[in-house]
Image: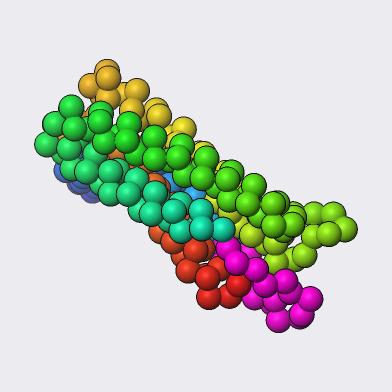
Amino acid sequence: MTMMSQSLDHTLAANFAAKPVDRTLPLRMLTWLLIVSVIMLFAAFTSAYIVRRSEGNWQEFEFPAGLLWNTIVIALSSVAMQIAYFAAKKDKFGTLKFTLFLTFALGIVFLAGQWFVWEDLVANKIFFGGNNANPSGSFIYVLTGVHGFHLITGLVFLLIILLSTFKFKVHAKNMLSIELCTTYWHFLGGLWIYLYVFLTIFK
């Protein structure tokens, strides 16, 4: 029995040595859990939107043109983020820093554009709450506002990666942080495009 136990211990030790623990797995799982939770949140919001719209008392109005411009801006930021990822894989640090900064700047432009969209809504008497509010307008504020909040978290993540590039901590042999940031940023871009198409169809 002792001989068998020792043999089993040696076998397990050899297997662990041959297959080291992937320490990146928890971070990947956390990122995807965050993405799945956001998907579920917006699925609930858009489902509630459709149900409430079918109940009547629904004000139809033209969406501000800023929503389309924001869609273009966030799509361009996603392209810049992907270029940054490819630059990191090839250790092109100049391109990496520039495209990360460009992605960050476009994210700020997107948030500013969203503020102007809200100003246009108010100017057209589309309010979030109060006696003059209609559910249709309130949903627009909620959907765009919650997305904007998550975009801010993406900008914080992006800023951390950008600062890390100046310390040469992001390179071809250390891709995890920029890989997860790229995944999350593409998700936010895709989510916004989904919202824009959804609101265009069901306005």
| Residue 46 visible, this angle | no
Give percent across and percent down for residue 182: 33, 45
**Which residue sits at x=25%, y=28%?**
97
In this view, 164 is above or below 174: above
Query: In the figure, is residue 11 to the left or right of 160?
Result: left
Region of the chain picked out in magenta, as a range: 42-63
Query: In the figure, is residue 140 to the left or right of 164?
Result: right
In this view, 79 is above or below 177: below
Give percent across and percent down for residue 147: 55, 51
Query: In the figure, is residue 119 to the left or right of 194?
Result: right
Question: What residue occupies the far top of the structure in this picture?
Answer: 167
Q: Is residue 57 magenta?
A: yes
Query: Who is closer to the viewer here, 118 or 40?
Result: 118
Q: Is residue 162 magenta?
A: no
| Colour theme | rainbow
Query: In the figure, is residue 183 to the left or right of 138?
Result: left
